Amino acid sequence: MNAFATPGPALWSAQAHMPSVIGNQLVITRGEGNYIFTDDGRRLFDGTAGLWHTNIGHGRAEMAEVAAEQMRTLETYHVFGRFLNDRAVELAEKIASISPIAEPKIILNSGGSDSIDVALKLARRYWQLRGRSEKTMILSRDLAYHGLHAYGTSVAGLDFNREGYGTDSLVPETARFDTYDIEKVRQTVAEIGPHRIAALIAEPIQGTGGVIPPAPGYLEGLQQIADEHDILLILDEVITGFGRTGHWFAADRYQLHPHIVTMAKGISSGYSAVGGIIVAPEVWAPFYETGAPMYRHGTTYSGHATSAALALKNLEIIEREGLLGRVQELETVLTAELAALSSDDRIAETRVAGLLGGIQLRPEFSAEAVTDDMVAQGWIARPLRGNVIQLSPPFTTTDDELRGFVAAAVSSLDTVAASSS
Ligand code: PLP
């Protein structure tokens, strides 16, 4: 017996304050469509699509069949050196065909944080190869979330994700820029010196920072700064990629031409752990020339065949069921529902872009308490930074479910307000 009492299960939860969650955890045992079920038999509407990723809904038998078939044929084979596997090749071709970047190359790996590491290392490696060895700085937005591997931690714009490691940035040479005002971004770039900057990285719509769509002209401004100063523009489309804005990519919605796009979540709707990057010719071409050095980015599961087969089927379902169009319709419903809350003086602001919505409460009302109550009532929502309630259900949500979800947020706000008055 361990001398220390170890409370709770052996599993150390991710992103959890352990003393608060022990004794209060939800064990999910089943998913079906837009709902999940707990081990004690409760049914909950998945209003966040897990972590903004279960875009086609849970428990699709078709996906299970694809996985079983691929496992029987070839569970996977690595894509190091001369080796490839057919599913990874096919997935890269599919992504290239819907990519916002023309003639791209695709690197595949296991998730969003992986994709950030591989993108940011590539940005630095690219400038080294071009003989611009002073270009090492990576600049990211205030309030940004780019996952939690060492590079993602280092470029976090949510300071709490960067703090506590004895240094401002685990990977050196990072800095933050303003998330709203493009003129301030220009100033930051000028102060640091564009000749030192390898890349700007940005979520087109900030997710974890509190569902923050870009101010008009902001992303276009980032594009301009990058183009003017020989700086790579990296769009982190881990949330927005594969339909959440009603387009395949937010780069399409905002008509941007990034050098690198990072992706994960929606590629497979979470049926397999896939991430990766889309790379523009300007960046990949120097690595394809005779005599070029290698870009060392591989992991064992890069291009995992079963993961790729699931991603391919997920993309097929999105196309077959017209889910991009459906997200556009749901955006209209969500916009109307949230606009109707404008007279509620407990609410500071509501924000929508695609099927990403946020209700920002005034400080007297806690988004955490409201989302706790929503979960108790059968509606999963999540509190985000800035006292915001996250609304990002699956693309398969019905209009009525979406309306019910917003109504549940208001009802839980009523409950919380009544208990605190
Ligand atoms: N980038 C963004 C914008 C994200 O929202 C996330 C996760 O939420 C990540 C990167 C990290 O992805 P993952 O959790 O798959 O490592």
Image (cartoon, rainbow, N blue to C red):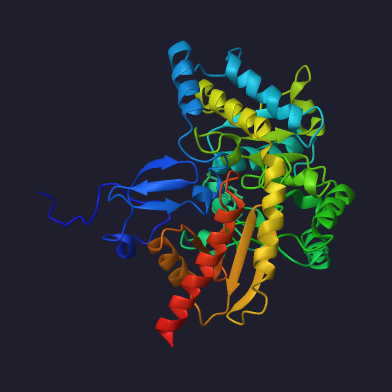
> Which residue is more in the foreground, 41 or 182?
41
Q: Is residue 142 left or right of residue 227?
A: left
Pick the quarter of the image with the C terminus: bottom left
Left-right relation of 74 to 285: left
| Vertical placement of residue 79 versus 32, above or below | above
Residue 176 visible? The answer is: no
Q: Position of residue 40 (x, y in %)?
A: 27, 51
Q: Quadrant of residue 268?
A: top right
Judging depth in this view, the residue of 150 and 146 nearest the camera is: 146
Residue 279 visible to the viewer:
yes
Q: Along the line of sight, which residue is nearer the eye, 401 or 376?
A: 401
Q: Residue at x 61, y 45 (%)?
A: 395
Q: Quarter-wise, where is residue 257 in the image? A: top right
- Residue at the far bottom in the pictured view: 421
Across and down, in percent, residue 23 comes to: 26, 60
Residue 201 locus on image (x, y percent): 70, 50
Q: Is residue 230 above or below residue 174?
A: above
User: What x and y, as percent, mark residue 332?
Assistant: 72, 56
Residue lying furthest front: 400
Residue under the point 84% across and 54% down: 220
Choose between 52 and 300: the one closer to the eye.
Answer: 52
